Amino acid sequence: MIPYENIHTVTMYLGAKNQVPYYNYILSLNPKRVIFNPGSENGDFADMLRKKGIEVEEACTLVMLSVGAF
């Protein structure tokens, strides 16, 4: 996977079971925030992210964008 730098936000649309192969990659990106969209909520991964100092939100990215809250 590509080692991007300076990632601010990762927005999740995958269900929790399908996220597992991406845990290490997303953690390696060290984003400032991860947004779990409806249906993608994942308490275990959210805990891992918080322990690394990454902000976690359970919200709809499209709604956040439409109301200027992104």
Image (cartoon, helix red, strand yellow):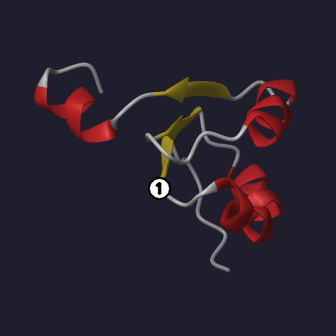
Image: 32 above or below 45? above
Nearest the camera: 29 or 35? Answer: 35
* 12 left or right of 67 in image: right
According to the picture, the residue beneath numbered tag 1 turns out to be 13
Residue 40 in the image: state x and y as whole percent: 55, 47
Total marks shown come to 1
Quadrant of the rendering where the N terminus is positioned: bottom right
* 68 left or right of 22 in image: left
Q: Residue at x 52, y 39 (%)?
A: 36
Image: 23 above or below 45? below
Which amino acid does the dot numbered 1 rest on? Tyr
Nearest the camera: 9 or 61? Answer: 61
Nearest the camera: 21 or 32? Answer: 21
Q: Quadrant of residue 51?
A: top right
Residue extending furthest bottom? 1
Quadrant of the rendering where the C terminus is positioned: top left
Q: Secondary structure at mark 1?
A: loop
Q: Residue at x 61, y 42 (%)?
A: 31
Residue 65 in the image: state x and y as whole percent: 20, 33
Residue 67 in the image: state x and y as whole percent: 14, 21
How busy is the neighbourhood of tag 1: few (under 14 within 10 Å), some, or many (20 plus)?
some
Residue 7 in the image: state x and y as whole percent: 53, 48
Q: Quadrant of residue 37?
A: top left
Q: Residue at x 78, y 58 (%)?
A: 23
